Image (cartoon, helix red, strand yellow):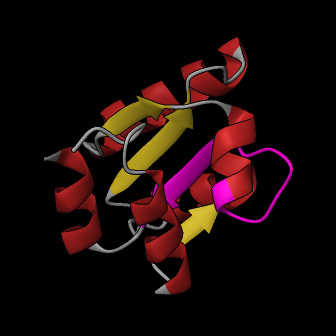
C-alpha cells in the first residue's frame, strides 16, 4: 500500500484506537513494545528521524515515510503530525503491503 495514496487508512486506524499520534506517544509505544509500525512524515526533522530510526532498529519495528506533517495532521485532526505509531499488527501489515 502506498501510504501517500491511502492516507484515509491511517485515519481508520486512529478511529479504531490502533494509532498513537505524536513523538512522545509513539516513542512510549515503541519502548513498551506496543508499536508494530512507525510512520514518519516525509518532512520530519533530522533529530526526529534519527531518534526513531535507531529505536526502530533496536526494537525491530518497521519504519515508513509518508506524506507531509500537514497532510498527516489533517487526516488525524491536528495541524501537523510528524510521527505516529500503529499498535495493531493487522493495520501495520496492511500499511506495509
| Percent position of residue 33, x then y | 38, 65
Q: Is residue 56 magenta?
A: no
| Residue at the right extreme of this rendering | 79
Residue 45 vs 61, above or below: the answer is above
Residue at 47% of width from left, 43% of height from top? 39
Residue 82 shows in this picture: no
Q: Is residue 76 magenta?
A: yes
| Residue at the front extreme of this rendering | 5
Residue 62 vs 92, above or below: the answer is above
Residue 92 vs 2, above or below: the answer is below
| Percent position of residue 55, x then y | 46, 37
Residue 81 shows in this picture: yes
Residue 3 vs 49, above or below: the answer is below
| Percent position of residue 94, x then y | 19, 60
| Percent position of residue 15, x then y | 54, 83
69 left or right of 3?
right
| Residue at the left extreme of this rendering | 97
Q: Which residues are magenta?
A: 75-86
Amino acid at each position: 500500500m502506498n501510504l501517500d495514496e491511502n492516507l484515509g487508512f491511517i485515519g481508520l486506524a486512529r478511529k479504531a484506537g490502533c494509532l498513537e499520534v505524536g513523538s512522545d506517544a509513539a516513542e512510549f509505544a515503541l519502548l513498551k513494545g506496543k508499536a508494530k509500525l512507525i510512520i514518519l512524515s516525509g518532512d520530519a526533522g533530522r533529530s526526529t528521524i534519527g531518534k526513531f530510526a535507531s529505536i526502530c532498529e533496536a526494537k525491530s519495528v518497521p519504519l515508513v515515510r509518508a506524506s507531509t506533517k500537514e497532510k498527516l495532521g489533517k487526516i488525524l485532526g491536528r495541524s501537523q503530525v510528524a510521527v505516529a505509531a500503529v499498535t495493531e499488527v493487522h493495520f501495520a501489515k496492511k500499511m506495509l503491503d
